[in-house]
Image (tube, grey):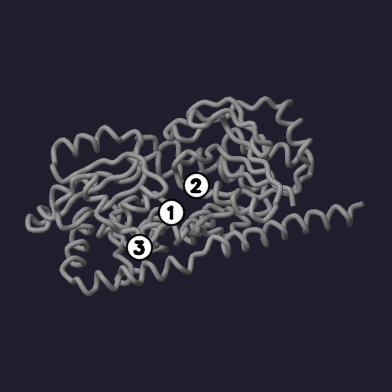
């Protein structure tokens, strides 16, 4: 199979979509699958000479600058794809690159699948643009009806799309590298590096932006019971448009550290060193960072809205709290830390759950669905011929 993958974001950008798609291309390389990624030019990337990548001029995407809107040069891109001669198109964006991919697939009668990664409609509320939501859904309904399968990462996302009359919606879940993210990477270096002396480390990893419900973190920093508050250090990992707000918290509170973006061993180390993962976002389609925390033996406190609630087993591997309710997060945090035996049990069960979430199995299932679509299309061509 020769697969063409269309995306607005890709490695080395640091977000869940980019990291998932890089995992996918790693899997394809390991299994000798020919692929080509059609993507925007990225400031983080050197000029890409590799045959597997085709980058186009681009502009930052409104509301989400980490993703970029490509400016397709249609003739050159057509030529590139004709030369590659793909058997299947996987379109991971509904924006300009995705539109071109869909147009090319329909014109050349190539089977196509798509994936839905981001609840952009939920983002609109955080930027006072809710009035655009009906228009956005109408566009997404039109766009996604052209594909043999539409992949989503969670049952919650699948239910939402079904309620919006989307068809052919299938689960493509996410895995985690349990060799990279592991409790065995716990050491004192993180405490030394960030000068942490408090008993507990509470960790947040993710984009720093309004749609991540960061105000819940701020309320928790200020309103935890005094006896607990003085024993907690908040380690916030990430970057984004709200970074200046988190930097201000760091100036106001001695027990807050903003570490910026971390990756690789540095990221694995902070997961392993922490005592609790706090992730209040209610806009996630999945929540890769919650699964990384679980692999590190780190219980999580999450929202009851979004795909994250399918990763955490309430009372077993963490707690599920009322979305947007800081008091719910505070009460659940206190109850967990008041029961050390429960906390230790959650650490073990979180790790054991993560061990069942193998990337190889997940990608194996995805390729079975790829092959089903490609086979059905080829059989149809044969019958017509």
Task: Give residue 57's quadrant in the image.
Answer: top right
Instruction: Please tell me which residue is depicted at 62% across the width and 44% down the height of the picture.
Output: 91
Residue 153 vs residue 356, the one in the foreground: 356
Q: Which residue is mark 1?
A: 288
Q: Nearer the viewer, mark 3 or mark 2?
A: 3
Give SS at disc 3.
helix
- Counting from the top left corner in percent of width and height, residue 151 is at 58, 54
- Kindly identify which residue carries mark 3: 184
Q: Where 226 falls versus 56 (above or below)?
A: below
Q: Secondary structure at mark 1?
A: helix
- Image side of residue 42 versus residue 314, left or right: right
Closer to the chain start, of discs 3 and 1, is 3
In the current view of this chain or complex, which residue is farthest to the right?
385
CA neighbours of label 3 inside 10 A, class few (<14), some (14 to 19), many (20+): some
Report the side of 359 relative to 242 (left or right).
right
Residue at the (25%, 60%) spot, across then down? 275
Q: CA distance from mark 3 to mark 1?
A: 20 Å
Total marks placed? 3
Image coordinates for residue 288, horizontal then vertical, percent: 43, 54
Task: Give the mark, 3 or 2, whose residue is nearer the N terminus.
Answer: 2
Q: Label 2 near label 1: C-beta < 8 Å?
A: yes
Q: Position of residue 172 (x, y in %)?
A: 56, 58
Q: CA distance from mark 3 to mark 2?
A: 23 Å
Left or right of residue 120: residue 116: right
Q: Which residue position is annotated with label 2?
A: 19
Q: Residue at x 51, y 26 (%)?
A: 59
Label 1: few (<14), some or many (≥20) within 10 Å? Answer: many
Between the residue at mark 1 and the residue at mark 2, the CA separation in whole angstroms equals 9 Å
Tell me: residue 337, above or below residue 306: below
């Amino acid at each position: 199979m020769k697969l063409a993958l269309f995306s607005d974001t890709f490695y080395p950008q640091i977000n869940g979509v980019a990291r998932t798609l890089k995992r996918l291309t790693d899997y394809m390389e390991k299994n000798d699958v020919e692929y080509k990624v059609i993507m925007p030019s990225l400031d983080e990337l050197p000029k890409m000479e590799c045959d597997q990548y085709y980058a186009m001029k681009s502009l930052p995407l409104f509301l989400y600058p980490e993703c970029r809107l490509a400016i397709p040069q249609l003739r050159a891109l057509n030529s590139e794809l004709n030369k590659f001669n793909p058997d299947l198109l996987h379109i991971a964006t509904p924006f300009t690159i995705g539109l071109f991919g869909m147009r090319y697939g329909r014109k050349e009668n190539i089977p196509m699948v798509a994936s839905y990664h981001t609840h952009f409609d939920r983002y609109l509320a955080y930027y006072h643009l809710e009035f655009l939501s009906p228009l956005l859904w109408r566009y997404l309904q039109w766009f996604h009806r052209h594909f043999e399968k539409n992949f989503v990462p969670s049952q919650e996302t699948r239910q939402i799309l079904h309620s919006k009359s989307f068809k052919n919606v299938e689960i493509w879940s996410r895995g985690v590298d349990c060799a990279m993210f592991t409790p065995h990477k716990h050491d004192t270096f993180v405490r030394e590096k960030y000068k942490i002396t408090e008993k507990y480390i509470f960790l947040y990893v993710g984009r720093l932006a309004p749609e991540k419900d960061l105000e819940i973190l701020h309320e928790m920093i200020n309103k935890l019971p005094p006896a607990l508050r003085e024993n907690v250090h908040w380690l916030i990992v990430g970057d984004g448009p709200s970074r200046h707000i988190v930097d201000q918290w760091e100036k106001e509170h001695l027990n807050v550290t903003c570490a910026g973006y971390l990756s690789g061993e540095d990221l694995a180390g902070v997961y392993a060193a922490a005592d609790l993962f706090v992730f209040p976002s209610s806009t996630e389609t999945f929540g890769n960072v919650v699964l990384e925390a679980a692999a590190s033996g780190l219980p999580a406190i999450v929202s009851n809205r979004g795909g994250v609630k399918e990763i955490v087993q309430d009372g077993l591997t963490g707690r599920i709290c009322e979305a947007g309710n800081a008091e719910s997060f505070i009460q659940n945090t206190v109850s967990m830390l008041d029961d050390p035996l429960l906390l230790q049990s959650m650490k073990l069960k979180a790790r054991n759950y993560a061990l069942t979430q193998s990337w190889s199995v997940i990608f194996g299932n995805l390729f079975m669905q790829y092959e089903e679509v490609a086979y059905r299309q080829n059989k149809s061509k044969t019958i017509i011929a």
